[in-house]
Image (spheres, coloured by chain):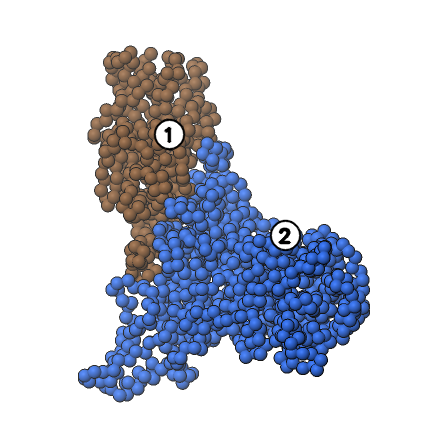
Amino acid sequence: MAGQEDEYDPILDNKREAEAKSQVSVAADKNMAPSTSGTPIHRSGSRPQLDLSKAEIQGNLEERDPTILLPNQSDDISHLALDIGGSLIKLLYFSRHEDYSNDDDKRKRTIKERLGITNGNLRSYPVLGGRLHFVKFETHKINECLDFIHSKQLHRRDPYPWSSKTLPLGTGVIKVTGGGAFKFADLFKERLGVSIEKEDEMHCLVSGANFLLKAIRHEAFTHMEGEKEFVQIDPNDLYPYLLVNVGSGVSIIKVDGEGKFERVSGTNVGGGTYWGLGRLLTKCKSFDELLELSQKGDNSAIDMLVGDIYGGMDYSKIGLSASTIASSFGKAISENKELDDYRPEDISLSLLRMISYNIGQISYLNALRFGLKRIFFGGFFIRGHAYTMDTISFAVHFWSKGEMQAMFLRHEGFLGALGAFMSYEKHGLDDLMSHQLVERFPMGAPYTGGNIHGPPLGDLDEKISWMEKFVRRGTEITAPVPMTPSKTTGLGGFEVPSSRGSALRSDASALNVGVLHLVPTLEVFPLLADPKTYEPNTIDLSDQGEREYWLKVLSEHLPDLVDTAVASEGGTEDAKRRGDAFARAFSAHLARLMEEPAAYGKLGLANLLELREECLREFQFVDAYRSIKQRENEASLAVLPDLLEELDSMSEEARLLTLIEGVLAANIFDWGSRACVDLYHKGTIIEIYRMSRNKMQRPWRVDDFDAFKERMLGSGGKQPHRHKRALLFVDNSGADVILGMLPLAREFLRRGTEVVLVANSLPALNDVTAMELPDIVAGAAKHCDILRRAAEMGGLLVDAMVNPGDGSKKDSTSAPLMVVENGCGSPCIDLRQVSSELAAAAKDADLVVLEGMGRALHTNFNAQFQCEALKLAMVKNQRLAEKLIKGNIYDCVCRYEPPSL
Amino acid sequence: MDPTQISHLALDIGGTLIKLVYFSANGDYSEESRNGCSVVKGRLCFAKFETRKIDDCLEFIRFNILHHSGVQQPNGEGHDKLYVKATGGGAFKFADLFKEKLGILFDKEDEMCSLVGGVNFLLKTVPREAFTYLDGQKKFVEIDHNDLYPYLLVNIGSGVSMIKVDGDGKYERISGTSLGGGTFLGLGKLLTKCKSFDELLELSHHGNNRVIDMLVGDIYGGTDYSKIGLSSTAIASSFGKAISDGKELEDYQPEDVARSLLRMISNNIGQIAYLNALRFGLKRIFFGGFFIRGLEYTMDTISVAVHFWSRGEAKAMFLRHEGFLGALGAFTSYNDQSHNDLKPHHHTVQRAILNCSGHNFRHIPVTSNLNESETIECSINLV
């Protein structure tokens, strides 16, 4: 062990060597206090500064010019930052993407050339994707934090390969903020061999808040009467705002812009007061225990209310109701009671309310003073605690007479750590916008619920073992019981918080913090009519009935999904173990969302479905339906020639109707829909397809076909302008894409319209992916000259077979058929975050076709575009059919919308 | 009518304390007559009781005021009820009790109106009433009666009311807080086992808040957080040290706990008061109410808070009779009825003329008991 330690401590080696060389060695005082001249806290400048601590003089003092060793010289490495507070350590670290796209792909190069994608990166160094991880530790268990850093080698990793410098081991510097930065500097040096660079606490808070408010769409939320509501803030209208950080004490900071802020006020009545007084009065052992007590308290037992003074009456002349608190703890005056005679629960609640309300009032007065519209509250005191947020919100609402709102931040515990991270010179975060960030919620001991449950996890095997012990299946979902929201009501006063019994955790309403994936290539879909008001989800899951229904559907579908996933990996013992872990993890997610719908931000059906896919990938089920898709593709390709021959025998008008019917009919093949899975066992694909198509009777439930036909074919003999480019968002593999969407694409191509097939970047159920589509197109092109020529033009077929009958002149006039990935791995699509390829392809597009329940109904049913839009789907869920289109299962939607300008 | 039977009484029954103001005529009966009115010389007397010991108050009134004035007892032959001005929430709560025990009927005055009336009365008629207190220095403030308005009145009772006063009878309660005197005594009792307000105040006089409050220097390793103007001795978190000391309540000195509590509440009130004065552009803030009680440390803390938050631009001012504002206001409201009341047996005040001698201007010592009172020599015109 001693030998191993030597490997990581070059300073010791140098020192030993120096001692051997010289008789006298002068070591710097290890206990030297920080410099007291000037301000002890400073931001690092644009150039790395010399770190002179622990410098030694090498060689004999008698020599005239001894060499000075600077062992702590370092370059900026932006991969780890900490906020060491009095009770919690918040750690932020960056890791690179494990997969890096291959730019040498011929197909991708062709597409990029055609779509005109150029590298618009103006930075001096490349911007790579990566992940921001958020971890918490308890400060008094700081050795666990150090173990975590060491186990992941976070203090050594250099995520930026362009850096030509080779850094010697153990000479890193970590950016740290918070009061504990001074206290633990020596420990970090001793255990990890790194130095701590202290960043100003207030500056870090503001930087972190600015980043979150700009970059994360569902970050800020209000909390009134137990209800959370996310507030979307326009990044261009962010400033000025008031940031109130409630830690041990309170700092009230006016933020006017990037790096422009001023601490305008504060108060010493903060979290430390609550906990300090609370400890003395209740003998609680921890802050959370104290909060938990308050859940069952009744403050009217100890606070003097207006009614107590006025004999049960209001003091209505000045708007104080009988239940308003006139004097906190005022009842303790007049009763001959000792401390032991009061319930700790009542004391804790009175204390919490007194302090929360006071903070809200002082914050409001300061916001009023500076004419600020928004107040954001953060800091460890708040901790996502429902009653605390309610009380602060009520105070602001009361004093402002409803004109001002208190807002809270989902990542509030990590403001300081984020700010410290951003104080590195090359953090790469300053230009990121919300459409370039995706938040995922993997299982993991430090992250679950934001709480710290167990040791930091290394690899997948460790994760599965931990889950087998600690994460039980969410049995609540099996028989969901509606939970009464914890509400507070009443003019000027709060009712007693409803008790949920001993099972309630004080962090039940705390919001989870996930892993932030930085994907610089994601963009907002440019054809959205109004990106600011765009809401992808059609179903409102804030409605409790809707939420329970869909959570139940997902829960019931879970066993089949696990079986399919395990089978796709060969059904091995390892696959079964991973499948079980997946089931535990996803059930835990569902239970969490039943308990707190806002746990992962604003909840929509698209988010739920994507969460499931991400959970599968987490346990290395990369494509659960791979074999099913392959089988269905082969079967569909086998019958495609007959279908094409049939279509070609029709008139143009009849063909258009048959094509749309075909898309709708083929959409019946959907492994995401329970009702349709049974159909697979009842016949061959072509039989089901024909039967489905034959059942089509117009008018469909939503039937804009006539308008679409007029747009395509014209009326009164007048020929319409053909579309320049159509984006076809495809759905399922098999018959859906091959017998439905490809023939439709072929029709556009025949008319000279460019076609871009848009498919998933990652697998989701049996949805077709952008990786699979070229082979499918190639298979179809064997039977169709139109598709073959278009595919060649679009770069999908790179080895053209020259047919004797085709002339080169004819080839050059063919419209191209291209494939781009959409940037997501979900059955639905949120057009606020699409791939840059898709965004580029959209520039010349004048028609968007959204196909399938996920893309056209669950999401985007109400979306409006700057271009024409055609939404096609068969509804395969009875409830959705009733709610959305007032119809029945298997009803069809053909919704055509002209451009929304 | 025997002039020695004349007496006037007003009460302010708050959540914690009952304040009395009553006029006591001395033996001299002067036939001085101006404009047909009799003039009686005597004193305005002040007394206070804990609300929870309201029976003591009843006995005091019965013995010292009613008996002395010769008013008939409720079960006696006299059928007339005595109307007394009363204010505060207790004027509603205890109305039946006073009627039953003493035959007194409360003529209720609005609490806020009484407060403002009392302050206006004092500021206009009592020289050397308002003063500042900072760094141990008390300075009386000369106030131009023509430049009195507007000002902010901060009344610190069980709770705190902050009232913007724009003129005679023109005022608005613009803010308040539940962290007031009731919080100090309530929490103080739980934390120190003190029995009374004065006992708690006495205790805090000797305490050291640095034992239990978390200072800026505790967080920043003994240094200032000079970037934002916080010295190392500034309190970052009241009672913050209790978090990590590992001590139980019994391990702390009650004096230190009481001191921290007093400072926390005083500083908080000063800050909220300043923010509200700033909001309305008010130059003067007057602090009153029984929480202050002339206690130097309390006034100093409030003054420091206002000075700190305003960066020296605003000043906290205090009133010598800060505890009796409501009662005084109720007392002076007798005057408002003179032109409406023609019955000769009602005693009303037309106008108060104060001739105050200097030797009575002293603060109530901290050690005084609740019933010791200070007086103002004055004369009152009677209808």
Q: Residues within 10 Å of mark 1 (few under 14, many from 20)?
A: few
Could you tell whether A116 is left or right of A31 in the image? right
Tell me how many marks there are: 2
The answer to whether residue A172 is above or below residue B182 is below
What residue does disc 1 label? B170
Q: Which chain is brown?
A: B
Could you tell whether A109 is left or right of A65 in the image? right
Q: Residue sitting at 71 percent across and 80 percent down? A: A805
* Quarter of the image where one finds residue A114: bottom right
Q: Residue sitting at 39 percent across and 68 percent down? A: A424
Q: Position of residue A223 (x, y in %)?
A: 52, 50
Residues at marks 1 and 2 touching, judged by CB atoms closer than 8 Å: no
Residue A193 visible, this angle? yes
Q: Amino acid at mark 1?
A: Lys
What residue does disc 2 label? A544
Q: Colour of chain A?
A: blue
Mark 2 element type: helix
* Quarter of the image where one finds residue A469: bottom right
Of the pair A526 and A335, the residue shown nearer to us: A526
Could you tell whether A72 is left or right of A746 in the image? left
Of the pair A488 and B184, the residue shown nearer to us: A488
* Quarter of the image where one finds residue A680: bottom right
